[in-house]
Image (spheres, rainbow, N blue to C red):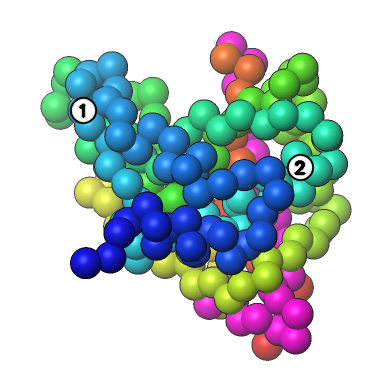
Amino acid sequence: MADYKTDFAARIGQLGLKYFNASELLTRTSSKNKFGTQNSRPPEAIWDNIIPTIIVLEALREHLGKSVSVQSVYRSEAYNQASTDKATGYTGRAKTSQHMAFTAIDFKVAGMACTEVAGILQEWSNSGRMFFAPVMFERKAVKVSAGTIAFGELPRSWKVWPFGTWFALKGYIHAYPSENFTHVDTRGLTSKMSE
């Protein structure tokens, strides 16, 4: 029987990350929220969804030269929507949150305001800055009870060209000043490669 953590670490290890590791991408997957609902690990079928997001975060860490602390990555639907009100769910989170599709990361940068961090990411997105992944990856849509989570443009399968895969950041970037964290996701990932 395959070992989840070992297999996940092997897949993330293929990215050659300098600043992050697989265990950070499993942050809070064994915790309970304030309503006592247990989170879970992301299903293996959607592991590749996080690849472009962590590549972007790796580039940001390199660019800033500052410590980046991962706060939240994957959330199961039950964990994301938990509430004392079963009819409406937790109103503080999106019912089709990108965290449930494993494309989002909430994080903090040591010594920086989240608005400044979000500004840098937005500039990268607006300018069409390219990012590199050394592997082929296939993103998969995730369906939850509220519907299919909004998810990128075709193609969803990203082929390794002679030396890897190049892509541009197209997603949602948001600063949360009350807790000084930044959200980034790659829901609208687009490729600049011709296919």
Q: Is residue 170 magenta?
A: yes
Q: Quadrant of the C terminus?
A: bottom right
* Tally of numbered discs: 2
Q: Is residue 80 left or right of residue 10?
A: left
**In the rendered structure, which amino acid carries the disc numbered 1?**
Thr
The residue that mark 2 highlights is: 60
Local secondary structure at mark 1: loop
Foreground of the two, 139 or 172: 139
Let me know if residue 147 appears in the view.
Answer: no
Residue ID at (44%, 36%): 27
Residue ID at (54%, 72%): 137
Residue ID at (49%, 64%): 11
Quadrant assignment, res 128: bottom right
Foreground of the two, 168 or 55: 55
Q: Residues within 10 Å of mark 2 (few under 14, many from 20)?
A: some
On residue 37, the disc is 1
Magenta segment range?
A: 156-178
Q: Please identify the residue farthest to the top as the structure is shown.
A: 178
User: What separation in Å lies between label 1 and label 2 (alpha carbons)?
Assistant: 32 Å
Mark 1 or mark 2, which has the lower sequence index? 1
Residue ID at (58%, 76%): 136
**In the rendered structure, which amino acid carries the disc numbered 2?**
Leu
Q: Is residue 191 magenta?
A: no
Quadrant assignment, res 112: top right
Does residue 179 sit above or below 92 in this rendering?
above
Quadrant assignment, res 75: top left
Residue 148, percent across and down?
A: 34, 57
Q: Is residue 84 left or right of residue 99?
A: left
Does residue 193 sit above or below 37 in this rendering?
below
